[in-house]
Amino acid sequence: MDLDAYRAEAETFVTAISREHYRHFAGFEPELRIEPIYDAHPGLFSRAAVDGLREAGVRSLLEFAVEGLIERATKAEAAQLARTEAALDIEVDGEPLPFRQAPVVQANEPDPDRRAAIGAARDEATERELQPMLRVTIERSHALVHELGWPSMTAMCAETSGIDLESLARAGAALLDATEELYEPVVEPQLREELGFGFERLRRSDLPAFFRAPSLDERFPSERLMPSFAATLAGMEIDANGRVVVDAEARATKSPRAFCAPVRVPDEVYLVIAPHGGRDDYEALLHEAGHAQHYGHVDPALAFEHRYLGDNSITEAFAFLFQRLAAEPEWLRRRLGVDDPEPTVAHARAAKLVFLRRYAAKLGYELELHRARVPLGELRADYARRLSAAVHVDWPAATWLSDVDPFFYAARYLRAWALEARMARALTDRFGAAWFDEPAAGVLLRRLWSSGQRAELEELLADVGAAGTTSAAHQLAPLLEELGAAA
């Protein structure tokens, strides 16, 4: 197999598909036209390519080929799903509301009953309009995995990613056990502060408003969003020299979820955000900036797979590292003039605990979903049960398929949170609490970013002076320590 030719064509494909995703989800194009892009590169995702890469032992390229083969086979459903979402309206109190804007409206809605009405309408539309396509996609994906010679999606992803998913899921279950006792005492006061009530009345539809944290709005003024971001990069003397473009303009069909689109790494990277107010905007901007600066500083001489592919736990860790600044006392004082950071710190701790528990539960559910040992429909109740137990709220089953990230991305998030906790501690020990104002910290980060995702977790930890075992249980241990839970 000619690996260099494969890499060259793969880069052409990824550039085209990333640009198309950027154009659609940034609200420039009404349709996601990915089918012609796949059709132009049939050899990338063939059975022959998968077999050749498996034999060659280039794991990141094999992962790319396998996932691309599955995505190509389900591209019609993906395109139709995007078209449906972009055009879909839900009705709340007799008024139409764009489906993609509903989470933003819900997060800013002060009336819990109206939040519930928005959530119910969105769930109903998800089940009616989206679930049939999602189900076809998952069933077709499982069939393709068997055709390629793997016993399940779980087994395939464990091999191609190099992540021991079963061990990580057990570590996630241990995290749920270890944080069960402190969960409500940590989260309850923040619920009451933001919503006016606690777990006794909490509904899934209230969580966007809780994360939105309106009580913190005055600490996170909209007019300081971009200047504080620019000052943070300047403090570390980080400059992507025009390679990173920030898109914060409002568009009707723009995705409410911020994202980073690495179209040509490292030369053309987009950071897309749809600001809607408050702390959420700061966290979203900083998170995607971690991705964007990472991609924008990758060594252009690296092979395709090290610039674009690899273990996304790495780029997610950089994203979480920047995101954490919005809850760091010294950053709040220096960038936003916050004299008393404790309310922000307490809310961030509670929100992070909710997310960690949710993703630990999601990973356990997705393992069962993708083992495909029971009929797909039987897992709907399992999803609701696991999420309800983790978050302590009656979790609706309607999102049992739409809440599934492709190819076990939940595992990447859990590993990234653990890596980020170690990196943050190492940076603080080395440069102090205001490491974000130290040019030397910028030098270190740029050096780490330059290697793309070539490094393994252990190498990255060693680079920041935080080397340690990468076993699943030890990976998550820093999170438990940070949250004040015993392992």
Image (spheres, rainbow, N blue to C red):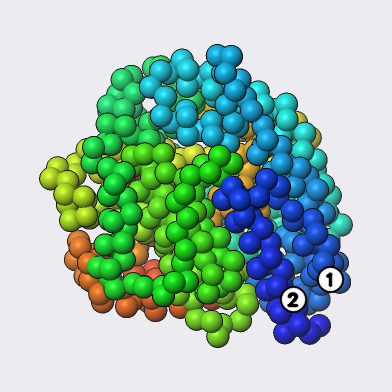
Query: Which disc number belongs to residue 458?
Result: none
402 vs 132, left or right, is: left
Residue ID for mark 2: 9
Give the residue type that dot 2 points to. Answer: Glu
Q: Is residue 104 visible?
A: yes
What is the secondary structure assignment of the residue under circle 2?
Answer: helix
Give the residue type that dot 1 points to. Answer: Gly
Residue 51 in percent (x, y) is at 82, 72
Label 2 crowd (10 A; few <14 / some 14-19 / many >=20) = some
Name the outermost residue toward the left: 339
Q: Is residue 381 visible?
A: no
Q: Give me the residue at 71% from left, 79% from top.
A: 8
238 or 431: nearer the viewer: 238
Q: Give me the residue at 54% from left, 70% from top.
A: 268
Residue ID for mark 1: 43
Residue 289 in percent (x, y) is at 42, 60
| Contact (Cβ within 8 Å) of mark 1 with mark 2 | yes
What is the secondary structure assignment of the residue under circle 1?
Answer: helix
Q: Is residue 23 above or below residue 350?
A: below
Q: Which quadrant: the N terminus?
A: bottom right
Q: Is residue 27 above or below residue 150?
A: above
Label 1 crowd (10 A; few <14 / some 14-19 / many >=20) = some
Residue 399 in percent (x, y) is at 62, 32
471 or 287: nearer the viewer: 287
331 or 83: nearer the viewer: 83
154 vs 423, left or right, is: right
Residue 283 in percent (x, y) is at 37, 49
Q: Earlier in the sequence, mark 1 or mark 2?
A: 2
Q: Is residue 435 above or below residue 21?
A: below
Q: Give me the residue at 38% from left, 76% from top.
A: 446
1 vs 112, left or right, is: right
Q: From mark 1 to mark 2, how far is it between C-alphas?
A: 9 Å
